[in-house]
Image: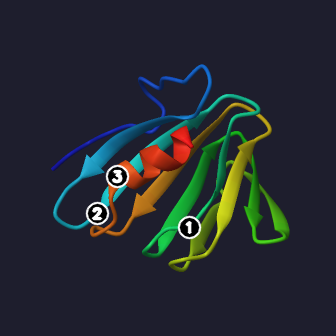
Amino acid sequence: MEIVSLLENVTFGDKQPAVQVLINNDFCKEIRIAFREGQEMKAHKAPYPIIIEIVKGHIDFGIGDERVQLTAGSLITLDSHVIHDLKATKESIVRLSLHKADQIDRVQQVVTA
């Protein structure tokens, strides 16, 4: 058993969102991404399906040419290879659920791009 909190010990990056791995076990990877207002993840895609949950705040979420406004409690799923981007319009905490075969380093590279 493993217990973690999405809302405790949150750190924010000064220039880019802060990525923290919360769970990495035999069947899943759960990542917390903490955004300051105005921080973003530029357009990218994942090699496997993903699930994104807005835990706190507000995210302007882009899928191709479409924009969706996601608030606390929103969940969105994306198939593999769907180009998307995120921009925090308020300080936000996002939970990213990755397929076990996906790479955590890939997420870190997107944030620093």
Q: Are marks 2 and 1 in contact (CB under 8 Å)?
A: no
Cα separation, mark 2 vs mark 1, equals 18 Å
Between the residue at mark 3 and the residue at mark 1, the CA separation in whole angstroms equals 13 Å
* Residue 1 spot, x, y in % from top left: 15, 50
Q: Which residue is mark 2?
A: 28
Residue 78 at x, y percent in the picture: 58, 74
**Mark 2 secondary-structure assignment:** loop
Name the residue at 47% across, 75% down.
49
Disc 1 on helix, strand or loop?
loop
What secondary structure is marked by label 3?
A: helix
**Mark 3: amino acid:** Ile
* Among the 4 quarters of the image, the one containing residue 3: top left
Up-down: is 111 above or below 15? below
Q: Dot 3: few (<14), some (14–19), or many (≥20) neighbours within 10 Å? A: some
Dot placed on the residue nearer the N-terminal end, 2 or 3: 2
Sequence-first disc among 2 and 1: 2
Q: Give the amino acid at mark 1.
A: Lys
- Gap between marks 2 and 3 measured at Cα: 11 Å
* Mark 3, residue position: 104
Task: Give the residue at the far bottom of this rendering.
Answer: 79
Question: On screen, 14 above or below 27?
Answer: above
Q: Residue at x 74, y 30 (%)?
A: 37
Q: Which residue is mark 1?
A: 45
Q: Quadrant of the C terminus?
A: top right
- Report the side of 74 relative to 13 (left or right): right
Residue 40, x across and y down, in percent:
68, 42
* Amino acid at pointer 2: Cys
| Residue at image location 56% in from the left, 46% down from the top | 94
**Which tag is nearer the camera, tag 2 or tag 1?**
1
- What is the total number of numbered labels drawn onto the structure image? 3
